[in-house]
C-alpha cells in the first residue's frame, strides 16, 4: 500500500472545480494514500459549487515534502485566483510528481511547469492552452499525458483515469483494478477525447469561399467531396485549396471531410435506429467496414461501442 510514501497534496483556491478534486482524491484515498489539502494562505476555500473545503495548511508549508502535488481545474473564462500560481510553484519544488486535472493545466502553465512539455486539458480548452502557451505541445485527444514528473489529464472525470494510472504505477495493477471496480469505472477508458471534441474541433475560417465550402460539406456529408470537386466548388486550384485548409482549419481537405462524416455518423448513432451499414451510407463512408476503420482511427472506438456508450435512452 501507499501509506509509506509521502503525502499527496491537493492545491486548492477559490473556485476550484469540485469534481476535479473529489474524483482523484477518492481514488488515492481508497488506494491507501494520505491526502492533504492546502491553499495559498492556509484558509478554507469555496469550490465552484459553493461547498467549503477545509485545508491542512498553506502550500508553502508543504514545500520539500510533497510526493504528489495535485492541481484541480478552474473556470478558464475567469482569472486564476490570486496567489495560486506562485503557491503552486513553491509547493511543486522538490515534489516527486506534479499532476493537473482538467483546466488545472493552465495553473501549471502559468507557473512555468509545462514549458517544453507535452500536456493535455479539457477538450474545450485545448485550443486556448495551445494558443496562450505555444511552448507547450498540447495533445487534444489524450485522456492523460505524462511527460517526466508532470502528468496532465483531460476534463473532469478524466482525473479519475489519471489517478488510477498513478495507483497502477505506484502500487501495481491489482490494487488499481480493485479501486476501479469499486468505483464502477474502466481501469483504462476506451477511446480518447475525440469522442467528445470532434464536433468543436474545427475553427470557423476567415476566407469566405472556404467558409461556404465547409458549410456545403457539412450540409451533405454523403456527397462526393473529392479534392477536385471541392476546389471547383470554391473556384480555386486544388493546391490553393489545400493551403487554405491547412492555414485556416489546420488539416487537409480530405481530413476535414472525414471529420464531418464522423460527426454526422456520431449524431445518427446517438439518436437514430438505423443499422451501422445504413449510417455508413448516409454519411458518405460507403460501407460498414470503412466506417468502422475510420471510427477506430479517429475516435479510438467502434461504431457499435460508441452507440452503446452514447445512445440516448428513454426515461
Image (spheres, grey):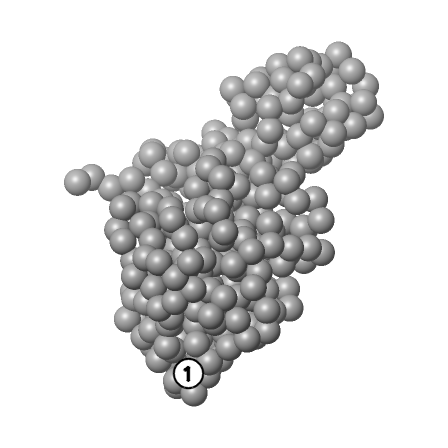
Task: From the viewer's side, name the closer residue of 66 and 4.
Answer: 66
Give the residue displayed 49% in from the left and 66% down from the top: 60
Residue 27 shows up from this direction = no
* Image position, residue 230 (x, y; %): 69, 20
Give the residue displayed 62% in from the left and 58% down from the top: 113
Task: From the viewer's side, name the closer residue of 203 and 90.
Answer: 90
Give the residue displayed 39% in from the left and 67% down from the top: 57
Quadrant showing the C terminus: top left
Q: Which residue is mark 1?
A: 2
Looking at the image, residue 20 sits to the left or right of residue 256; the answer is: left
* Image position, residue 260 (x, y; %): 55, 31
* Image position, residue 72 (x, y; %): 44, 55
Quadrant showing the N terminus: bottom left
Image height of 17 relative to 187, above or below: above
Task: From the viewer's side, name the closer residue of 176 and 231.
Answer: 176
Give the residue displayed 71% in from the left and 49% down from the top: 135
Residue 255 shows up from this direction = yes
SS of the residue under disc 1: helix
Looking at the image, residue 245 sits to the left or right of residue 27; the answer is: right
* Image position, residue 78 (x, y; %): 46, 37
Query: Could you classify mark 1 by the number of other residues whose Cα lies within 10 Å: few (under 14), some (14-19), or many (20 or more)?
Result: some
- Label count reads 1
Amino acid at each position: 500500500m501507499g501509506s509509506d510514501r509521502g503525502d499527496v497534496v491537493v492545491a486548492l483556491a477559490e473556485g476550484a472545480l469540485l469534481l476535479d478534486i473529489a474524483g482523484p482524491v477518492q481514488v488515492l484515498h481508497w488506494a491507501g494514500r494520505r491526502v492533504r489539502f492546502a491553499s495559498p494562505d492556509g484558509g478554507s476555500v469555496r469550490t465552484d459549487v459553493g461547498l467549503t473545503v477545509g485545508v491542512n495548511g498553506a502550500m508553502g508549508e508543504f514545500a520539500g515534502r510533497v510526493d504528489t502535488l495535485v492541481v484541480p481545474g478552474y473556470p478558464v473564462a475567469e482569472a486564476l485566483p490570486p496567489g495560486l500560481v506562485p503557491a503552486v510553484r513553491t509547493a511543486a519544488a522538490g515534489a516527486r510528481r506534479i499532476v493537473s486535472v482538467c483546466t488545472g493545466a493552465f495553473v501549471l502553465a502559468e507557473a512555468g511547469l509545462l514549458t517544453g512539455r507535452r500536456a493535455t486539458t479539457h477538450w474545450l480548452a485545448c485550443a486556448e492552452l495551445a494558443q496562450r502557451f505555444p511552448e507547450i505541445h498540447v495533445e487534444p485527444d489524450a485522456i492523460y499525458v505524462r511527460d517526466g514528473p508532470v502528468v496532465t489529464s483531460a476534463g473532469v472525470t478524466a482525473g479519475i483515469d489519471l489517478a488510477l494510472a498513478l495507483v497502477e504505477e505506484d502500487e501495481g495493477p491489482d490494487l488499481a483494478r480493485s479501486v476501479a471496480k469499486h468505483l464502477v469505472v474502466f481501469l483504462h477508458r476506451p477511446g480518447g477525447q475525440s469522442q467528445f471534441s470532434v464536433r468543436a474541433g474545427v475553427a470557423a475560417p476567415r476566407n469566405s469561399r472556404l467558409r461556404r465550402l465547409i458549410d456545403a460539406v457539412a450540409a451533405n456529408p454523403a456527397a462526393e467531396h473529392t479534392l477536385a470537386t471541392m476546389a471547383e466548388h470554391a473556384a480555386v486550384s486544388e493546391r490553393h485549396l489545400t493551403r487554405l485548409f491547412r492555414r485556416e482549419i489546420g488539416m487537409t481537405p480530405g481530413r476535414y471531410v472525414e471529420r464531418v462524416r464522423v460527426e454526422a455518423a456520431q449524431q445518427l448513432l446517438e439518436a437514430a435506429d438505423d443499422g451501422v451499414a445504413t449510417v455508413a451510407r448516409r454519411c458518405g463512408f460507403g460501407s460498414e467496414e470503412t466506417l468502422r476503420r475510420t471510427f477506430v482511427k479517429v475516435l479510438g472506438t467502434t461504431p457499435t461501442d460508441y452507440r452503446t456508450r452514447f445512445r440516448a435512452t428513454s426515461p
